[in-house]
Image (tube, helix red, strand yellow):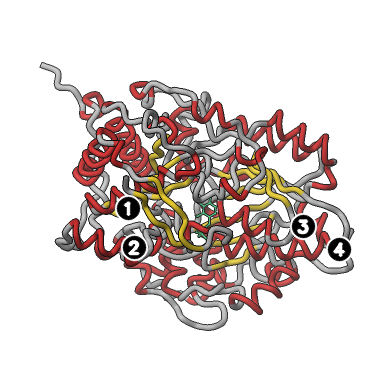
Amino acid sequence: MKLKTMTELGTPIPSHKAYIIRSTKDVSMEQRARVLKETEYNMFSFPADLLYLDYLSDSGSTSMTDLQWAAMFLGDESYGRNKGYYALLEAFRDTFERGDQPRKIIDMYLTGENDVEKLMNDIYLQSFEGGFVNGGIYQLSRPNTFITPQGRVAEYLLFSTLAEVLHEIDPTKKYYIPNNGHFDTTGANIRAVDIEPVNVFDKTIVLEPFPAEEMDKSNPFKGNMDVVQLEALIQEKGADSIPVIYLTITNNSVAGQPVSMANIKAVNAIADKNGIPLFFDACRFAENAYFIKEFEQGYQNLSVREIVKEMFSYADGFTISLKKDGMANMGGALLLRDQGVFVQKYSINGKNIGTRLKEKQIVTIGNDSYGALSGRDIMALSMGLYEVVKEKYLKSRIGQTRYFAKKLAEHNVPVILPAGGHAVYLDMERFLEGTGMKTEDFGGVGFTIELIKHYGIRACELGPFAFEYDQRPPEQQRSILNLVRFAIPRNAYSRADIDYTVAAVVELFNHKESIPKVRISRGKELSLRHFQTGLEPVYD
Ligand SMILES: *Cc1c(COP(=O)(O)O)cnc(C)c1O
């Protein structure tokens, strides 16, 4: 008799064990209804402690691993050149540049290495240049690695400094930054310095149907940048109006869909031809690499580490939130290729762009060896970068997201397929079909309010409300998708939790006529208004 393996049976192999748990509280529907009302029905103001499940974000909501907690004990809170600084810089080199040959010097700390000569030679006095992470004297003379508390701080640092340089080059010129899907803070940081963020993706491709049962077999990489649109934009505006091209991997604003290596190469070739630096918004680089391994021809036999190395070989720099695939609860970074296109182009008037960035980093977020992070946080994310590229973890992570989407699809709930890496997105256009709800009724928000009220689950509208449909010109309105996102915290929820969520969503879908329209009661014109406006459901 030959027994089937669990993989053949479609049941995932356990990827971890939970030794610490947190109990939920018994909150009644009436209590939740009262809290909703008193917090102006804004998803961001609902107290997390009163929820059963929280899919607001996968950002910083990770359960860290035992190795990360162990590393935190070794955190060094010194003001200058704490131990973790070296571990983190090496973790960056290992992750983004060394593929299957990591040096992993953090192990020397974990095992209490006491050989001073060895520590000096292997860690403290090592110099590096020519990559994303200069070391020793080169990090001082040509700074190119900037630790920040979050991704958005890295974005602020980059775009505010870039705008100063562009202003010195030509104070009157109008600039554009294309992206396969600007994240909300990325777009806002660019707009804040009077540069125009341009989304370069094809909405119809994202919404194209895909059979749920195909999800384990193929993937259309719907997160790709539309290269035809990109070339048209460069033609129309001129290459000198585009200071940098951005590629977000995976594409969070476009339903968390992955970007293929072929697309990365194609965008790189266009950037190269036009002398424009290519940057990644690299928040979910590991999940993206796993999709490439699973579904892109020629990559099945490469490790995720090797795929990550190849992906980053096409970038000239990147911003990253380490609260995502850094597996930590806090952290971010900006990295520039040493003497790359960006550094050469924007080091003007006798001043290295890295030096400008570092000066701003020091006056706003702290010196370069900690960037507003505690020493223990730096250790947690140094270790997190090794944890996140483990393939068993990635398989279970992406498998859980896929399971969630598959279960919803089995109940005919309109969900974007295939599932992305970190989140499941409901297509609210189709979800609300037949209810007579209009785009500006913000039915997606109404759904999230009901979901909290009845079932204690928080999700987030990323549609006409969040993307300010009513405040945008018609040509921008057209690219706004009407989605509700369930972002899954890493290593925090079980299959039973997903089943609870599916049951709740299906029940609301079957009673969709009860979902209220939502009106903005305060702060309609505020920027990033999903974080700050007051709302009011309108029950008929
Ligand atoms: C989360 C995120 C950011 C911003 O990072 P924070 O750490 O939240 O500031 C930028 N881009 C993408 C794609 C993200 O998902």
| Callout 2 secondary element | loop
Earlier-in-chain disc, 4 versus 3: 3
Quarter of the image that includes the C terminus? top left
Q: Is residue 315 left or right of residue 324?
A: right
Question: Which secondary structure lies at badge 3?
Answer: helix
Residue highlighted by disc 4: 348
Q: Which residue is mark 3?
A: 343
x, y percent for residue 370 = 54, 74
Against 251, is 208 above or below?
Answer: above
Amino acid type of disc 1? Answer: Arg
Q: Is residue 336 left or right of residue 502?
A: right
In the rendered structure, which disc, 2 or 1, sits on the residue that comes first in sequence?
2
Tell me where residue 37 sits by quadrant.
bottom left
Residue 437 placement (x, y as % from top left): 42, 37
Measure how far apart labels 1 and 3 are at the Cα level.
42 Å
Residue position for label 2: 46
Give how far apart the Cα atoms at labels 3 and 2 are: 43 Å
Looking at the rendered structure, the kind of residue marked 4 is: Ile
The mark found on residue 458 in the picture is 1
Which labelled disc corresponds to residue 539? none
User: Residue furthest toward the top?
Assistant: 1
